[in-house]
Amino acid sequence: MKIQRLFLVAAVVLAAHGASPGDDTAASFDARLDPEQRILQALNRLTFGARPGDVEEVRKLGVEKWIDLQLHPERIAENPALAEKLKPLETIRMDSAEILKQYYPQFPPGFVRPTPLNELLPGEAYRKLFNGAAEERRAAILALDPEKRLQVMAMIPPNLVECFPDLQKEQADARKKMQEERQMQMRLLRPPLNDLLDPPQVRIARQGTPAERAALFASLDPAKLKQVAAALPETALAGEPGLRRMAAMMRAPQQVVLEDLQEARVFRAIYSNRQLEEVLTDFWLNHFNIFEGKGQTRAVLTSFERDAIRPNVMGKFKDLLLATARHPAMLYYLDNWESMAADVFDVGPFAPGPGAFGGPRLFARQAHGLNENYGRELMELHTLGVNGGYTQDDVIAVARCFTGWTIRQPNQKPEFVFASFMHDPDEKTVLGHKIPAGGGEQDGLEVIDILAHHPATARFISTKLARRFVADDPPPALVDRMARAFTRTDGDLRAVLAVMFASREFFSQGAWQSKIRSPLEMVAGAVRALDADSTDTFTLVGRIGEMGEPLYGKEAPSGYKDNASAWLSTAGVMARMGFAEALANGRMPGVTVDWSRFAGMDAEAMARALLHRDLSRNARAALEEGLKGPQATPARLAGLILSSPEFQRR
């Protein structure tokens, strides 16, 4: 469509030349907004986008009072609809131990657990097999009855039969037969769709209308329905959250944990009345970024967001920093859980033997020594910033201070524990501060205190907040005032935010429409602008990922960048346009729009309804060009406006 090409060019130009429609200079940050612009500025920065009625609410209450209310979310009654939306996502209310127990089974659901070798073999046979001489091993194997021998041969390590060619072949055959039996078992548990349905039913299940699919699913008995759901791809169950969850529990239960977390994040962005709290949760999750795909982190991410991030987004920065430092998710992600003093095992019977041919070092595989990852990212990304004045010696010293900060029962009930035997007890020097020997866990606590009160931290955090809420290149004078408030209030984040939101720079022409919506802001903002109802955010989560921001999916600890160039690649802009068109035309399963609200509106009226301001001259011309030809239905108008550069700015 020609309109899409016009908007694509406009958006890419925005990326190349900056998001702000005006002159982003010191003078523009002194130029004030008019009263109506102030209302929109507050809504565009403290929420995921204005809903119908929000402008009137802020106008009635007053901008300053509305901002103060958002700064105190405990005073805001939460949207009752949100609780109902979140209710099916049961893992967001579970602790990590419950999640591991219920969603991380050792074997696939329904799979028959193989009998362990120590249960298959009597004690003496087990001893001979693993510790006996070669002929003892052979005799122990040959003495087994055929069925048990097949199981044992499929399970034992190949080195146990490497000197017996006949047993090597027998083992290869046994392993092949065991693999075939397991594949057959899995096929019986999860048969392919063609084994479950006839061809017309397969077509309906994959491509039928919602009514056809509902009728088909209703006709199946519960056991068969579960198998059919497991045989369909997740995308085929978009808009069917119950069936999709049922299928995931059969295929990969741990995927449910991530999907609950992602879908809850989008539901909250759309429906929560405590919008600033949700915006700040998004900010701090990105600041303390954790990648869900590393090791065990997915199992503990739910607790990380709920227990470490959310309670602290408007509290003291030191409390937030400590909560993240001690959380198993951060300990896993940046490897501190396995960081220990280099000489931990150089004692007693664990020490290596004398000379070049000394005995093997027990626990050598588990002993990783000092790991600097957390120490480095703690200073570079979480507190001081890359130019915060620390050295490599400081990185090493901080890492030494955090040795022993690890996880108790990591696979059953993961929780923070300080393991003194892993700790480096010697003296350290961090940023010029002497940390005496023998401090134990207090060494790490002292580092947290040093970094939380460092001037570079005050400036770094203030800069990032100003970049998120004011402009990609925030005015230094504002950052200075915010940093002073940070220092004066002992890192009180609410106080720092209050200084920023009351500043002339925040309500200035330099800040006006100077930010580009992130993919999460784009998706949540579009749904809020249309006042659409979402019963399932699965497809919305997928669209956010297509635009370049898979939730909890940023592998690097730096998180996603917060500037226009990060989001306005050609592929990203095309994904935004595709989303806007699909949303407006009813191709977003689980999301519905009541178009009667927009009946009779022309392009100008529709723009005011969705943008809460008039279109610019260029946008109006582009819309007029794009509307030539087919009838301008409300859905078509909405799709064009949500695709426009005007909507991408906030």
Image (cartoon, helix red, strand yellow):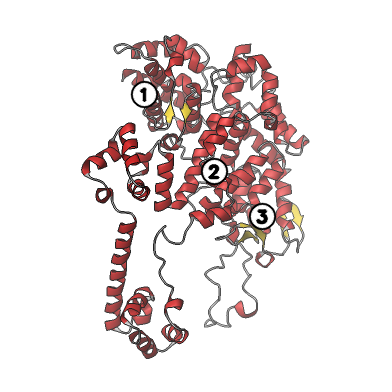
Q: Residue 510: tell me if it is visible.
A: no
State the residue position of label 1: 585
What number is the disc on residue 398? 3
Name the front one of labels 3 and 2: 2
Is tag 3's residue or tag 2's residue first in the polypeptide sequence?
A: 3
What number is the disc on residue 400? none
Tell whether 175 sits left or right of 608: left
Q: Nearer the viewer, residue 285 or 248?
A: 248
Q: Residue at x 70, y 23 (%)?
A: 502
Task: Label 3: state its secondary structure.
Answer: helix
Task: Label 1: state its secondary structure.
Answer: loop
Name the front one of labels 2 and 1: 1
The kind of residue tagged 3 is Val
State the residue position of label 2: 558
* Extreme residue in the left direction: 199
Is tag 2's residue or tag 1's residue first in the polypeptide sequence?
A: 2
